[in-house]
Amino acid sequence: MKLKSKNMRNKKKSAKHLPFDLSYTQSRELSWLQFNARVLYEASDQRVPLYERLRFAAIFSSNLDEFYMVRTGSLVSASRSPDDAPDSTCGWTAKEQLSHILDATGPLYDARDDAVKEIESALSPCGFQRLRRRDLSPRERRWLDQYFTEQVQPLLAPVMLDPDAPFPQLAGGAFYIFLRLKSPQTGESETDAETRHALVPVPDSLPPFVCLPGDGVRFLLTEQLVRDYAPELFPAFEPSGRAVIRVTRSADISPQGDAHSEDYPEQVRQALQKRPSLGAVRLEIQGKLKMPSVRTLCAGLGLEKDQVFWSDSPLTMGYVWQLADRLAGFPALFYPPFSPHIRTGTGTVMARVQEHDLLLHYPYDSMEPFLQLLHEAALDSTVTAISLTVYRVAKHSQILQYLILAAQNGKAVTVLFELRARFDEQNNLEWAERLEQAGCKVIYGIGKLKCHAKLCLITRISDGQTHYITQLGTGNYNEKTASLYTDLCLMTADPEIGADAAAVFDSLTQGTAAPDCRVLLAAPSGIKPGLCTLIDKEAEKARAGQPCGITIKCNSLTDRVMIDALQRASAAGVPVRLLVRGICCLVPGIEGLTDHIEVFSIVGRFLEHARIYAFGAEMETLLIGSSDLMTRNLDRRVELLCPVRDPETAAQVRGILQTQLSDTCKRHTLDRKKGYLPVRPSEGTAPFEAQTFFMHR
């Protein structure tokens, strides 16, 4: 799906007044919406199994929720500032960006409605039906009446709104039924004096849906069930409009104070308590409401009418995951079963890593060897210390359980918990407390910088010498997401990498940013200049007529310095291939500027999450790590990139890039005029899907 704001011409008009060239860049926000459109494309792809298509529609909905809570919420705050400066990639102020976002969002709701309707229709032969009360037989209605009376109605707390009282505070993300009511004695007139409004909160303690007795998966969503029965809660009135509504509020919380201070956890807790009541940024409506009722809602929530979106499909689709077991009798609805490969070898993992580097490629490789490494370290008498950074971690984390075991066995265990990992703050707080109680040293950050690096260091003393085993990754220490995200996990006994990792942890425990390293690149000071140097070297090769090339795989490219460095390399003649899953503010194919740049994106069964930076015509120089090419990663976070020095491991990483660049099933290419277009195999060539290849390798 192509997204283009009707006001795109404003960008070109204002470019000459700004201190940056906008001719080869595009809006970060619209680029993200293009990414989510590619997610929705999977929901419409006939080659994807039907349940998985429904799941992609649910992922699209969840993504859009987070986008409005995070990005739109922060733009609303920025738009109110007197320093609302133009963005360096699109030239728009925050207020202008919000306008373009709202313009581009409406068509996505229409596309989701079409996709969900088509999927549900195709699922009906499997007994799958999402129903309303009016769709039921008399016998089923009697059953549902009893269910509502006994299980639902006792939990409801309907509220008649008083036009002279303050509008009630609606929780972000919660369902409410909003009703327009009139008294039977008033006749047919619809004047404001004769109408009232009411709210019925849908309790989150209720299950998301109720299944009807009998065969198949025939169900009613709880919010629709309450909507159907809501008029009965106001027997003295007649309904003249009712709908499911849902408010999205900003999630842009910023704990005050220094992350290295002792009371920082409490500051985070206090900030979390404010999140449900932050400003509204979006109103979603499913159902029928007259415009006077919509205006009442907007006035009460402080929203404009262009922040209101109507939907025929469910406003949230988290229920989709709970339907999987009920459809288990139809295996064709799902992706074929897949079990990750467990890399085995002789001896312990610790001994194997001391002999040569070990690279895991999640989810195709199991996380088990890394878990085993931690378990061995927790029990090994030569291990004196284990240090780990945590950004997001599983609720039931075997990794952290092994660290607790290590502490119980007398190892010095240090864990840096990033308490500002959005939406994971509470889980991180709870785990941090458990580790502290187990005797681990826990630190909470480095001043105003977030720690996003993925680093684990095992320190050993053997024969009087200090030895290191270092693990660096592109993804979080989370067993759950390791089965869903494609990431790299490098385990190495390289002494220089280990010495750098030790220096990084020394700095972090002292509350300072990562230092300049010998072999690692560390943000906020080292990654951007280090990558720019590597990019410029390729440009020098191109100008000298030597073989050259740049291949980058990352999640987002938004940083202006990195964009300009890649543009200069292209202008010098360097072939640049970018595999950017999500946001890409660089526009390829601009003659004389970016015509040597190709931009691709892969969206498939697994979320592409690895970051790989390759330089040279044959990808001779390789780095992997935690950092995307975003200003927040490069300037405001602790991030690490690690060189891949072992020849066998480097060949593996090159193979990953080459395989993904050959994909003709799930890869899209960014066209400067037409947006993202699916890549298709050439005539007479069989389709090739990289993720399937890795699963079967």
Image (spheres, grey):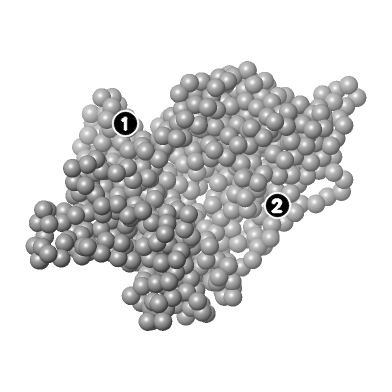
Considering depth in this image, is 627 or 327 the residue closer to the camera? Answer: 327
- In the rendered image, the quadrant that contains the C terminus is bottom right
Which residue was labeled with disc 2?
Answer: 366
* Relative side of 470 to 476, left or right: right
Question: Residue 304 sits in which quadrant?
Answer: top left
Q: How many marks?
A: 2
Callout 1 amino acid: Ala
Kindly state the secondary structure of the residue where label 2 is placed.
Answer: loop
Q: Nearer the viewer, residue 597 or 314?
A: 314
Label whose residue precedes the other's in the sequence (1 or 2): 1
Residue at screen point 59% across, 53% down: 484
Residue 187 lies, with reference to residue 347, above or below; the image says: below
- Give neighbour class at mark 1: few <14, some 14-19, many 20+ (Cα, 10 Å): some
Q: Which mark is residue 78?
A: 1
Q: Which mark is residue 336?
A: none
x and y percent of residue 539 in the render?
A: 49, 33
Q: Report the residue at 74% width, 49% height from top.
A: 368
598 relative to 426 in the view: left or right: left
Q: Write the residue at 55% across / 28% down.
A: 265
Asked if residue 102 is positioned above or below residue 118 in the image, the reply reads above
> Can residue 310 be seen from the camera position used here?
no
Picture coordinates of residue 5 (x, y %)? 26, 48
Label 1: state its secondary structure: helix
Q: Kindly indicate the quadrant of the structure image that contains residue 413.
A: top right
